[in-house]
C-alpha cells in the first residue's frame, strides 16, 4: 500500500513539473523573432532570434530585469545607440556584443563555447 502511494506521489510530482515547464515555455515568443536595430540608421538586417535554441537557459539569463518590468524587449532598457554608450551596460551595443559579460549574447556564447561570436555569424547587410 505504501509503495503504491509513493509511486502515485512521484507520478503526480512529475506531471506537475512537466506542466509548469510547458506553461513557462508557452510564454516564450515563436522562433524567428526579428530583433531590429533601434537606431535611425540600421547597418544590418534584423537578426533572427530563436527562443527554442535557448530553451535550456533560465529566462532571467537574458531578461535580467523580468521581475521589474512587464515589457520584455531588450530595447526597452538597452536603446542608446550612441558611440558613447558602446561601453555602457545600458547601451545597445554593450548589451549584445560585450565579449567579457556573460549577460551579453556574444559574451555568453564565448563562455559556453557555443553559438555565433563573429559579426557575420548573426549580421547580414
Image (cartoon, rainbow, N blue to C red):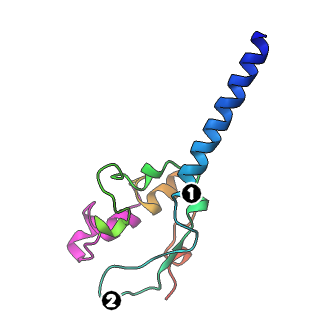
How far across and how far down the image is residue 3, in percent?
78, 13
Upstream in sequence: badge 1 or badge 2: 1
SS for callout 1: helix
Disc number for residue 4: none
Query: Residue drawn at (58%, 54%), measured in percent from left and top?
Result: 55
Determine if residue 56 is in view: no
Splitting the image into 4 quarters, where does residue 44 fall?
bottom left
> How dense is the environment of label 1, judged by Cα within 10 Å: few (below 14), some, or many (20 and up)?
few
Query: Do callouts 1 and 2 mark residues in contact (Cβ within 8 Å)?
Result: no
| Residue under the point 47% across and 52% down | 59
Of 97 and 90, nearer the camera is 90
Residue stretch in magenta: 79-100
**Badge 2 density bin: few <14, some 14–19, many ≥20, Cα 10 Å:** few
Whole-number angstrom distance, CA of label 1 to CA of label 2? 34 Å
In the image: residue 72, left or right of residue 34 = left
Residue designated by label 1: 26
For label 2, the residue is 41
Mark 1 or mark 2, whichever is nearer to me: 1
Residue 80 at x, y = what percent? 25, 72
Q: Quadrant of the N terminus?
A: top right
Amino acid at each position: 500500500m505504501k509503495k503504491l502511494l509513493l509511486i502515485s506521489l512521484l507520478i503526480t510530482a512529475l506531471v506537475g513539473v512537466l506542466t509548469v515547464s510547458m506553461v513557462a515555455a508557452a510564454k516564450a515568443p515563436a522562433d524567428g523573432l526579428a530583433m531590429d536595430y533601434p537606431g535611425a540608421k540600421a547597418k544590418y538586417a534584423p537578426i533572427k532570434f530563436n527562443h527554442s535554441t535557448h530553451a535550456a537557459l533560465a529566462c532571467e539569463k537574458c531578461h535580467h530585469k523580468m521581475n521589474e518590468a512587464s515589457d520584455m524587449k531588450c530595447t526597452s532598457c538597452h536603446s542608446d545607440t550612441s558611440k558613447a554608450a558602446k561601453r555602457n551596460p545600458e547601451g545597445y551595443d554593450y548589451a549584445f556584443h560585450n565579449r567579457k559579460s556573460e549577460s551579453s549574447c556574444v559574451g555568453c556564447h564565448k563562455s559556453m563555447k557555443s553559438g555565433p561570436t563573429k559579426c557575420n555569424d548573426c549580421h547580414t547587410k
